[in-house]
Image (tube, rainbow, N blue to C red):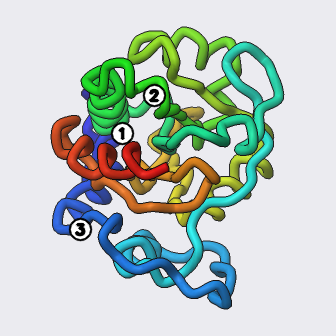
Amino acid sequence: MPEQQAGGVRRLAAMAAFALLAAALPPASPGAQEAPKRRSAAELMDVLMWNREPVGGTFALTDQAGRRRTDADFRGRLMLVYFGFTYCPDICPTDLQEMSRAVNLLGAEGEAVQPIFITLDPERDTADHLATYVDLFHPRLVGLTGSPEAIGAAADAYRVYHEKVSTGPDAYTVDHSAFVYLMDREGRYLGFFPPNTSAERMLTIIRPHLAAK
């Protein structure tokens, strides 16, 4: 595994290892201001940990089959939303595996949970490429890509830190925060799971929200 490529995501994961799940926190006030652009990873993690601002919102992207998809397509189901990129060497695959395993462990109840992967690397992660990638994790995992502007807008709405970092001539990686976001049936933010959260731990938070109608 290339150390340069893994380093950025590992640094962000190490910061998040001490984060508490935000699902138990009170909701942000409706009058909270929208987030300014280009804040640091630490600042954005602080927003998520203490629920200081609204998280989530509308997006209009393209799925792995080339279809236009928006957040409204998933109303009526809980959403597990993950931002990453397919060339991520370890953190992204591990988190996607646990997220998918959580859906499987729910059995029939898992039909009420929609797993979603949004790339932060639209340059390389085309719809065709995502189709091969998401199939490795779960048959219902929706992979989303789009223009850099559309991806940036979605990442900003979810308070995702991301930065393209050169690793050599014509080579780069993407440093990014790595959280699994839990959204309710109306697309409202419920909380997040830090990197390396096990499927079993996710279920302790997901199940009560499944029971709530």
Q: Identify the amino acid type marked 3.
A: Ala
- Residue at the image point whose x is 25% and y is 27% from the top: 1
Residue 184, given in percent of the width and then of the height, sits at: 52, 52
Q: Position of residue 161 (x, y in %)?
A: 50, 62
Alpha carbon separation for disc pair 1 and 3? 24 Å
Point 26% across, 55% down: residue: 13
Q: Position of residue 44 (x, y in %)?
A: 46, 73
Closer-to-camera residue (71/213): 213
Residue position for label 3: 19
Q: From the viewer's perspective, tell me whether residue 166 is left or right of residue 149.
A: left
Which of the numbered marks, if any, corresponds to residue 21?
Answer: none
Residue receiving disc 2: 87
Task: Please state the horizontal and vertical placement of residue 73, each as a whole percent of the image.
Answer: 73, 35
Disc 2 secondary structure class: loop
**Left/right of residue 19 with respect to residue 162 in the rendered view:** left
Pointer 2 with pointer 1, Cβ within 8 A: yes
